[in-house]
Image: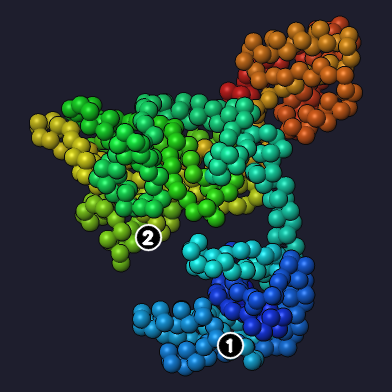
Amino acid sequence: MKKDKIHNIRHSLAHLLAMAVKEKDPEVKFAIGPTIDNGFYYDFEFSEGFSLSDKDLKDIQKRMKKLVSKKIDFVEKEITEKEALEIFKDQPYKLELIKEFAQENKKITVYESGSFTDLCEGPHIKNTEEINTDAFKLTRLAGAYWRGDEKNIMLTRIYGIAFETKEELGEYLTRQEEAEKRDHRKLGKELDLFCFSSIVGAGLPLFTPKGTVIKEELQKHIEKVCRNYGFQTVITPHLAKIDLYEISGHAKKFGKELFHVSSEAGHDFVMKPVQCPHQTQIYASRPRSYKDLPIRYMESEKQYRAEKTGEVGGLNRVYAITVEDGHTFCTPDQVKNEIIGLVNIIKDFYTALGLWDNHWVSLSVRDYAHPEKYIGEPEDWDLCEEMLQVVSNELGLNAKRCEGEAALYGPKLDFMFRDAMGKEVQIPTVQVDFATPKKFNLLYTDKNGIEKHPVMVHRAVLGSYERFMALLIEHFAGAFPLWLSPIQVRVLPIADTHKKYAAEVFEKLKNSEIRAEIDDSNETLGKKIRNCKLQKIPYFLVIGDKEIEDKTVTIESRSRGNEGSISVDKLVEKFNKEIKEKK
């Protein structure tokens, strides 16, 4: 009930926002005003000559609070199409929606709040006295195309947040302040991890040497984990003939999101939107026996999606996606053990990052009302969904069944994690696919010499490196664990007389494959230490007269402070242990 109540409060505040805006611009055109996570928004087309800035939000918010104090009722009324067209005759966006509702034989309802009437299916609170005026806030303005289509007019969107209590609002605002500090776009620039170039193009990130270290360490780690489960690395090209994706069904699925490549010599290719169709052709390159199965391929390569320009931003939405991808070809009786093994891979990987203890699992199944959205036979889907349910039960995953969330070719287990800020992200997935091997006529010979289609199990553990790095940057606030840190340790000689020994220490660390730097500048020790902290380096080593005399270093930890003196050999041993254990 609590969730329903706050939803109704937020929905009602969207109407109050529209009422307050109309007082400022009587000729305003209203679009839609739905609820969203933690709040609401409303889209407006303002009259010619009228402008609104972030500074005006305080005035609008103040007016909304006055409206709340008037104890206005929200009264629902069902009306005819003719009545609706008359009420909203000067509101083009409402008229468009009314005509659609009529075509779909949907009932048309409005909510009256005093003298204000809005087209809405509800629900709402009964009266504004249910709203705590200290528990909501207008936050920002943004541009939004009508219905998300770039061909339509750009509207002005006003966002708000709302809770039941002042304390909940305060807690949310505090979390948001912390989230801004952790924003991967901000930290990526400050820590010199990645950049963008207008000449290269938006949505095409460039990874600096430091950012590349993180990507390569992640790849080495995930490939090592997967190799222990029998995966072998393959490489496939970045483009293919459209025929490949027409067979797989991805040409239809991605449609306008495909990048087409042609040449004057008559070449006509598509940049790959996914890796699985390519990998089917490696499997198909030679005869297979049941004795060969399961065959497991893994690949970390680029994929390309022509995302809408307005949706591209940071590392979360890009055109060129480096995807960690894997596919198993197996017999039907091997599928269950394969899924269990993949779940264990995911568990091992996310445990090392401290994320496993805060997750839930979605069993993503078909939209049963719209089977045309998927490929494959209904009986195969039934079997796959049942199989995933059995695995969930046996492993205690307590997977929540989510209709309509399945992949094109089969159901899946999706793992949802919460980062350090409580934000939920879905990255790892295990998907069962009977359809694709049949589409490509992939075969193996069983023990009776009969040719059969294998089952294809798709898996992604860290998904796209770009999105995963955005998650890690924000989760760790840029303070990566030792094994992931681009710079693991920096050597700090106090004065010129200490530089020779510092250089020897630096060389020993470097030769031990520790990612070390030396700051032999003429800056003060205090400034050198501040620079280490700004760069969020896990360790720095201070070297002065005593360290030279004792043939030691003084070790300072980013998280634990001064850890005393230690020999370089012991230090290398300590670092290697911490890196190996991935704490």
Q: Which of these two is toward me, 401 or 369?
A: 369
Q: How many marks?
A: 2
- Position of 258 with respect to 417 (left or right) is left
Q: What percent of the width, then of the height, locates residue 246? A: 27, 47
Can the viewer see residue 163 in this picture?
no
Residue depicted at x 73% and y 13%: 506
Side of 512 relative to 230 (left or right): right
Q: Residue at x 35, y 36 (%)?
A: 263
Quarter in which the N terminus is drawn: bottom right
Q: Earlier in the sequence, mark 1 or mark 2?
A: 1
Question: Relative to the observer, which residue lies in front, 426 or 210?
Answer: 210
Residue 402: give x, y in percent of width and height.
Answer: 41, 59
Relative to residue 330, is residue 564 depicted above or below? above
Q: Is residue 178 left or right of residue 282?
A: right
Q: Residue at x 52, y 37 (%)?
A: 465
Q: Tell me, yes or no, whether the two marked residues, 1 and 2, touch with CB atoms within 8 Å.
A: no
Q: Please tell me which residue lies in front, 405 or 282.
A: 282
227 vs 461: above or below = above
Residue beneath disc 1: 117
The colour scheme used here is: rainbow
Query: SS of the residue at dot 1?
Result: strand
* Residue type of the residue flagged with mark 2: Gly
Q: Badge 2: how crowded within 10 Å, few (<14), some, or many (20+)?
A: some
- Quadrant placement of the C terminus: top right
**Badge number at residue 404:** 2
| Residue 186 in sight | yes
Q: Residues within 10 Å of mark 1 (few under 14, many from 20)?
A: some
Position of residue 541 measured from the top left corner of the image (x, y, whole percent): 79, 19
Point out which mark residue 444 bears: none
> Residue shown at 60%/82% (left/top)?
125
